[in-house]
Structure formats: structure tokens, C-alpha cells
Image (cartoon, rainbow, N blue to C red):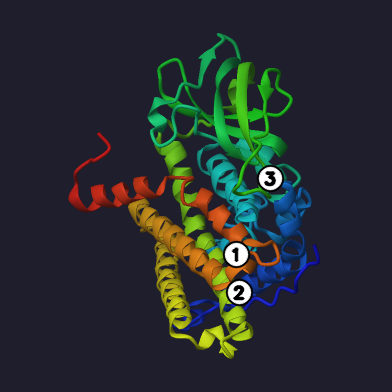
Amino acid sequence: MAAKTDNFQSPDYFNVDDLLTEEHKLIRESVRNYVKKEISPIIEDYAQRAAFPQQIIKQLGDLGCFGPTVSEQYGGGGLDYISYGIMMQELERGDSGVRSTASVQGSLVMFPIYQYGSEAQRNKYLPKLASGEWLGCFGLTEPNHGSDPAGMLTNFKDNGDETVTLNGAKMWISNAPFSQIAVVWAKDDAGDVKGIIVERGMKGFTTPTTHSKWSLRASATGELVFDNVIVPKENILPNVKGLKGPLGCLTKARYGIAWGAIGAAMDCYHIALEYSKERVQFGKPIGGFQLQQKKLAEMVTEITKAQLLNWRLGTLMNEGKVTPAQVSMAKRNACEVATNICRDARQMLGGMGITGEYPVMRHMMNLESVITYEGTHDIHLLITGMDITGLNAFK
């Protein structure tokens, strides 16, 4: 399949760029140029083949997309959260799977080691993860415990020496098949949830690949299986106990999704707008018909609202004032906006919308995962509901 030229231009109907610093804009230009050069020409082929472009691991490391908010002392970028959001927006504009690779590495692997780990753990793992030398994954979801992680069965037993024995399984794990390490959440002898770093090569640790996906086809997904895996106690994250550990990671990752999903929406809007000016029916471009203008006007309106919401969320993150419920609202909003925009764009493209000649159907399929993972659409709605009423609908 011949690669189409990527001439993406992002919509900015309310001059949101005026709220960004010059550094923010430079970061955006850098990641956008990377996506145009390295992702757009290859991604349709990889998605069609359901293959993971392993070369992006080192590329994303070189670009600074792994752990951009982590201190430079450990190989991170030392950047603010708006910079991180912009990076995720641009990567997901290319493909949700590419953004997932970066999100998992930065928010779900590097962040817990940085925030909850020992100094020895930070020095051992973070520089290799930041550079892309190592890839990591995050093990929370289990075959029978998704939205209710408190019910997890994965556990580790104290061996009475300097080790523990880990047993259990995790599934729907992005990056798993190619990861050197996994940050796994499991219960200790007392039933407390702890994070533990499991390294590839430990006997009894396997990462079977998940096949037959219709979504995130260019992203590597797998399971984590632990069959009496002996892990040194020094691999346990010492500075957190309970579900606040993994949930704190998910707050950071959901923040990235709020920005990322709008990247996919922007791409579909851009494609639909360009197509509407070129596609002639009944003697004029279809962009001249009222129903098509309605779709485009609603797309750019929702993108604009989401851009402003994300910018404000990023400001609150930078100030340390954000609440997990605010992040949930933004994640849910972005996923809904992006899903609707992709579907409308697909309709505007007619039959061409289902082909790999345009990215719209690929974005649509990807977003069916994004709207579900790291808190389903309904779960995030209930988080907002509980926040505003003070009443818990989960029990």
C-alpha cells in the first residue's frame, strides 16, 4: 500500500496556542514531525498485519517521550504536564497504539518506580526505560478482575529469606510481549496490595501474546503469567501500600489519554475537512452541503472544548491541585468526543472511510479500546457521579 503524504494541520479555533509557551510549541513541532516522518508512512501496514513496530521503542526514547515529567537525574525530561499532554496528543494523532506504548512506559512503569521506588530501583531501571533501551509494562487487570481491582488474586508469599514467590496472572497488558520488566500489583501475606518489579528471564514468568484483536492492532498486547516466580524482596516498591499505588499511576496515564484521544479526533477532523473540499457530488464539493457542514462544525466545536478542558487540566496538574475525578472527567470526555468524531468522519468519507487509504477506520477501531481501558466509559461516569453526590454507586 502506497503511503499517503501526511499534511496534517491541527485545528485551533479558540487560539489555544496563545496559552502555550514557546517550549510547548517546540515540543509539539518535534513530535508532530516525528509522527509525519516515522509513523504515518508505516502505521497502516503494521495495523493491517497486526504487527508491532519495535523500532519505535528506541525512537520514542530518543525523542524524550518516555517519562518526560520524570527528573533529568534519572534520564527523564524534567518537563511539565502540558508538555507531556502535547506529546501524547501528537503520538495518538499518529496511532493510539503508539501513544499507548509511551503512556505505559512513562505513567505506568517509570512513574511508580520514580514515585514509590527506592533510590536503588530508580537508578537501576529509570535511565534504561527513559532511553528506550528497556521497555516496561504494568500488571493490574486480571482475567476475573478488571473494574474491581481490589478483588485481585495475584499474590506473593514471603520465603523467609531475601525472596518472595509470586503467583497469578494479568491480562490485557500493553507492551507485555516485548517488555524487559513488569511493574506488577499483587497481594502480600497480609493481603495488602504492593508493587513488585518482575524481570524477564525470571523462571516461571511468561508473557503470552494476545492475538485476534480488531483494535490497537499495531500495539503489542499480552498476558503476564507467574508460576512460582522467585523475586528478590529488593524488587518490591517500598513507598506505597494499597490500591492508591496503582490508582495513582492510572491517574497519570488517564491524563495522557485525555490529550491523546483528542489527537485521534483532530486527525479524523482534518481528513474529513480536506475530503469534503475535494469530493464532488451533485456538481459541487460535499463540504458545501448543510449536513456535511453540520458534522464538521460539531467536530471542531467538540475538539475546541476538549482542548480547553485539557489545557486547564494540565495547569492544575502542574500546580499539584488536580483531583483524580477531574482526570476521569477529561478522559471520559476525550474518548466520547473522539469516538463520535471518528464515526462522523467515516460517514463523510463513504466507502473510502473503511479502507486503509485513510486512517479513520483505524482510529475508530483503536478508540474502542481507549474508551474501555484504564477505567471504562461507565466507570468514569460513576466516578464523577460519586464526586458530585458523595454517594458510592459501586457498592
Query: How far is disc 2 from disc 3 in space, using C-alphas?
Result: 34 Å
Q: Using the rendered view, name the quadrant where residue 159 is placed.
A: top right
Residue that numbered label 2 is attached to: 271
Q: Earlier in the sequence, mark 3 or mark 1?
A: 3
- Image quadrant holding the C terminus, namely top left
Residue at the outermost front position: 282
Amino acid carrying label 3: it is: Leu
Q: Earlier in the sequence, mark 1 or mark 2?
A: 2
The quarter of the displayed image where residue 294 is located:
bottom left
What numbered label is drawn on residue 179?
Answer: none
Q: Mark 1 to mark 2: distance in Å?
A: 8 Å
- Is 283 in front, or is 377? 283
Q: Are marks 1 and 2 in contact (CB under 8 Å)?
A: yes
Q: CA distance from mark 3 to mark 1?
A: 32 Å
Look at 68% across and 25% down and name the residue there.
206
Q: Residue at x 52, y 65 (%)?
A: 342
The answer to whether 190 appears left or right of 354 in the picture is left
Q: Is residue 317 above or below residue 185?
A: below
Q: Secondary structure at mark 1?
A: helix
Residue type for callout 1: Val
Label 3 sits on a secondary structure element that is helix
Q: For mark 1, what is the residue?
A: 360
Please state which amino acid type lies under the numbered disc 2: Ile
Residue for badge 3: 129
Residue drawn at 64 percent across, 54 percent down: 76
Q: Position of residue 385 (x, y in %)?
A: 25, 50
Can residue 318 be seen? no
Q: Judging from the image, what secondary structure is the residue with disc 2 in?
A: helix
The spot of residue 160 in percent (x, y) is: 55, 8
